[in-house]
Image (cartoon, helix red, strand yellow):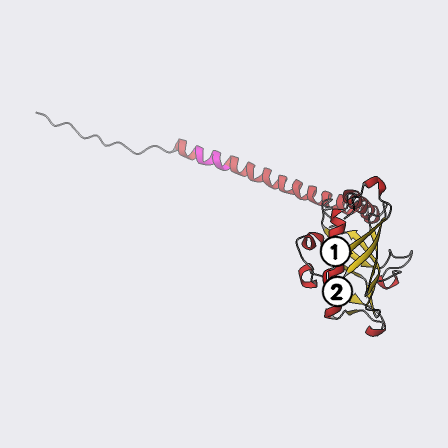
Amino acid sequence: MAELTPQAIASHAITLHAGPYGPLRILAKPNPDTGVLRCRVEATKAVGVFTLEPAFDADDVDLTTTRLYVHYGDELPSGAHTGQYRPNRPVINRTVHLVDYSLIDAHTAQEGGRTPNDLGMRIWRRDAGSGHRRAAVPDRTARHVAAIVAQLAIYWLQRPDLDHLRRAAARHLLHRIGLQHKRDRIAELEAMIADKQRELAKHRTQLAWMSDLVTEHAASTPGPAVRRIPRAVA
């Protein structure tokens, strides 16, 4: 892969190789505000945009995540809420129009995962062939898409601006969902801790008077009488 510098990254043209599916001509362009990476793919039997977005647990944002949403098409237009409205959705074999997204771990691709089963992918279509309803793609198409996605995921992991993309994506997510859920969780835990502290204090008080009671009883109880055996007279 050609060397990149973070300062030079605006868009980047590169050719990747998807095994038996041949070369992939990629034009990659990052969004520095949202942290997504737009990948325009052109190949013999595949064309369209794959948008890569770091995937986070909203309650525990991990800035080293290798989990990745692969959205089929460009970013959603304003006011749209479902993947069918993404422009430039990928078309496979000129007939299968991909829709929505797949969730993968890019590290699995880096370790050699290339199939839908390897990557844990679910891949959907929405086109005339599916009656314009969301449906699973055929197995052969799924293998083709998985091979493309694996190469894109590896490329994403190797980008020198990866840390910036993840941080920007995390910031964008937190702006969108807010921090109140985290504040609420902290308040909930603080209330639980306060309750447990009161319970702990109660048990310590009980232990103290129980210990005093046991000590008091032991001090007031006479010891066993000692029987003296008279000495024999010679």
Q: Is residue 14 left or right of residue 106?
A: right
Place of residue 172 in the rendered image (x, y in percent of width and height, measured from the top left)? 83, 47
| Camera-side residue of 91 and 76 | 91
- Observer able to see residue 68: no
Residue at the spot 72% in from the left edge and 48% down from the top edge: 65
- Residue type at tag 1: Gln
Q: Please state the horizontal and vertical placement of residue 213, each as a whole percent of the image.
A: 47, 35
- Residue bearing mark 1: 151
Residue assigned mark 2: 144
Say above or below: 92 vs 168.
below
User: Element type at marker 1?
Assistant: helix
Q: Residue at x 48, y 35 (%)?
A: 211
Asked whether 212 falls inside the magenta stretch, the response is yes
Instruction: Based on the picture, tell me whether residue 149 belongs to the magenta stretch.
Output: no
Q: In this view, does 128 lie above or below 69?
A: below
Residue 14 drawn at (x, y percent): 81, 52
What secondary structure characterizes most of the magenta part? helix
> SS for tag 2?
helix
Give the residue at x 69% y 55%: 109
Identify which amino acid the numbered label 2 is placed on.
His
User: Considering depth in this image, is 178 or 185 the residue closer to the camera?
Assistant: 178
Residue 70 visible at all? yes
Q: Where is residue 68 in the image (x, y as percent from the top left)?
A: 75, 53
Q: Which image quarter is the C terminus in? A: top left
Cα separation, mark 2 vs mark 1, equals 11 Å
Identify the magenta region: 210-216
